[in-house]
Image (spheres, rainbow, N blue to C red):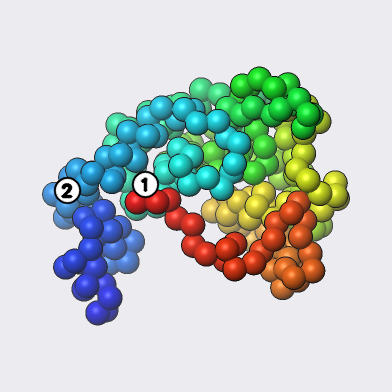
Amino acid sequence: MDAINFILKNGDTWLQYATRMHILEESKEDMADLKLQALSDPKIKAYLNDITNFHSILVSNHKNPDLPIHKLLFLLDIGFTTDVPEIQTAIDKIMENKDSNGIYQSLTNIPKHFGGSGEDLFGWCLCDAPLLLFALLKSGIDYKEHIKQGVDCLVGFHQECGFPCTVSKEFGKFRGPGRKDDPCPYASLIMLKLLSAIPEYSESDIVKETAEALLSLWGNSLERHPYMFYMGTDFRKLKAPVM
C-alpha cells in the first residue's frame, strides 16, 4: 500500500489514473477531473497525436515502440477508451483495412529480395495482426461482428509448437529467417495474449499448448533460437513505449 500511496502523491497524472482505475477500482465518475488532467499531460497528448495518423509508420520492425499500435495499446491499458476522440480515430483507421478473412492489415513494405513486391502495401503478418484485433477487443468493438472471423482465421495457423511465421498473400513468399516448421516466439506470444482475452479461447488446448511452447523456448533459450530470437539479457528487459 505504501507504493500505491507514493504513486497517488507523486506519480504522473496518467499513472495515478491507471492506479485508481485498475488497482483501487474507483468509478470513472469519481475520476473525471483526474482523467482530464491525465489527458492534458504532454506525454499523453503526444501519444494521442501520434495514433491519429495510424498508418504513418511502415511496420518493418514489430518491436519498435514508436509504432502507433503499441502506443494505442498503452493508452488503452491505462484505461482510456474510445470516448477520447483520438482513440476513436485510431480504431476507425484500423477498421478501414480488413481482408476477406476478417484480418485487419498494416502498411508494410517487403523488399523484393525478401520475396515481397518492394512496394508499400496493406497486408498482415502474424506478428502484427493479433495486436490489431486485440486493440479492437480492448476498445469494446463488437466481437462477433468485427473480430471473431479474423481470430478464427489466425487460430487456423496453430501448430503443436505454437504459431509459425505467416503472412498474407500481399507479401508474397516472405517469411522470417529460420526453419519453416519452427514457431515464431513473438507471433506465438501475441496470439496467446489475444486468445487469453477471449472467453471461447481462454481455456482452450490451443492456449495451453502455445503457453507450453513459449515456456519451453524460454527454458531452452541458450540452445534454441527460432527465427533468430535470441532470448538473452536484452530480450528480458521491459520494453514499454518510451514516455
- Percent position of residue 187, x then y: 67, 49
In the rendered image, the residue lying farthest to the bottom is 2
- Percent position of residue 42, x then y: 23, 44
- Answer with left or right where residue 17 lies relative to residue 76: left
Amino acid marked by disc 2: Gln
Residue at 67%, 37% (x, y): give it.
125
Label 1: state its secondary structure: helix
Cα separation between marks 2 and 1: 14 Å
Identify the mark nearer the N-term, 2 or 1.
2
| Residue under label 1 | 75
Residue at 66%, 20% (x, y): give it.
119
| Residue under label 2 | 37
Front residue (pair 154, 182): 182
Q: Quadrant of the N terminus?
A: bottom left
- Answer with left or right where residue 175 lies relative to residue 198: right
Amino acid marked by disc 1: Leu
Residue at 28%, 58% (x, y): give it.
15
Task: Residue 145: name its quadrant.
Answer: top right
Task: Residue 149: name its quadrant.
Answer: top right
Q: How many marks?
A: 2
Q: Is residue 204 visible?
A: no
In the rendered image, the residue lying farthest to the left is 33
Q: Is residue 177 visible?
A: yes
Q: Is residue 21 above or below residue 75?
A: below
